[in-house]
Structure formats: structure tokens, C-alpha cells
Image (cartoon, grey):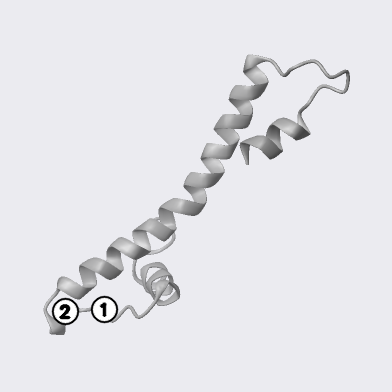
Amino acid sequence: LFDKFTELTKDPSGKPSGFATKALCALSAGGLAAIMGNPADLALIRMQADGMLPPAERRGYTNVVTAFSGILATEGAAG
């Protein structure tokens, strides 16, 4: 993403981008990666922890989609 963002913000005259532009591109790329990665990581951790619970307390996550829907249904979007 960083490369795509820096390409989009490239100066038409061919001069290299400044520090502020590169920093903004890096922050944007990192922020989008965190927005996508954190929920997936939450679902994977919940699935692993679910397997260690006693059978009566398990939530029965079978895949990431059921984990996402179960978390959203019981805890809401904020988790």
C-alpha cells in the first residue's frame, strides 16, 4: 500500500516526495493494515481459545466467518 500511495502522491515534475508526504503515506498504509488485520487476529485468537474451554462453555466457532458473526452478535462492533 505504501508504494501505491507514494505513486499516487508523486510530484508531476519528477522530484522526490518530501518527508511529510512519505510519512502521511506510511501512516495511511499502516492504519489500513491495522483496520484489516486486527479483527482477523481477534477472530483467530478467539477460535484458538475456544478450543481450550470445557465443551459446555465452547462457542462452537468453525471458521473465521462464524467467529466474526458470533463476536458481532454477542459483543457488538467494538468487541
Q: Secondary structure at mark 1?
A: loop
Residue 79 visible, this angle: no
Query: Which residue occupies 63% across, 30% down?
Result: 25
* Percent position of residue 30, x then y: 52, 38
Query: Which residue occupies 43% across, 57% down?
Result: 39
* Percent position of residue 40, x then y: 42, 60
| Disc marking residue 57 | 2
79 lies above or below 18: below
Determine the image quadrant of residue 3: top right
Using the numbered discs, state the Cα–Cα distance from disc 1 to disc 2 in whole angstroms: 7 Å
Q: Which residue is mark 1?
A: 59
40 lies above or below 2: below
Single out the residue that lies furthest toward the bottom.
Answer: 56
Nearer to the camera, 55 or 70: 55
In the rendered image, the quadrant that contains the C terminus is bottom left
Determine the image quadrant of residue 19: top right
* CB-based contact (under 8 Å), mark 1 and mark 2: no
Q: Does residue 55 appear left or right of residue 19 in this picture? A: left
Q: Does residue 38 appear left or right of residue 3 in this picture? A: left
| Disc marking residue 73 | none
Which amino acid type is marked by label 1?
A: Arg
Q: Does residue 18 appear left or right of residue 44 in this picture? A: right
Single out the residue that lies furthest toward the right.
Answer: 13
Nearer to the camera, 40 or 16: 16
Determine the image quadrant of residue 22: top right
Q: Does residue 46 appear left or right of residue 68 in this picture? A: left
Query: Which residue occupies 29% across, 65% down?
Result: 46
* Percent position of residue 62, x then y: 35, 80
Query: Which residue occupies 70% across, 31% down?
Result: 6
* Percent position of residue 38, x then y: 42, 52
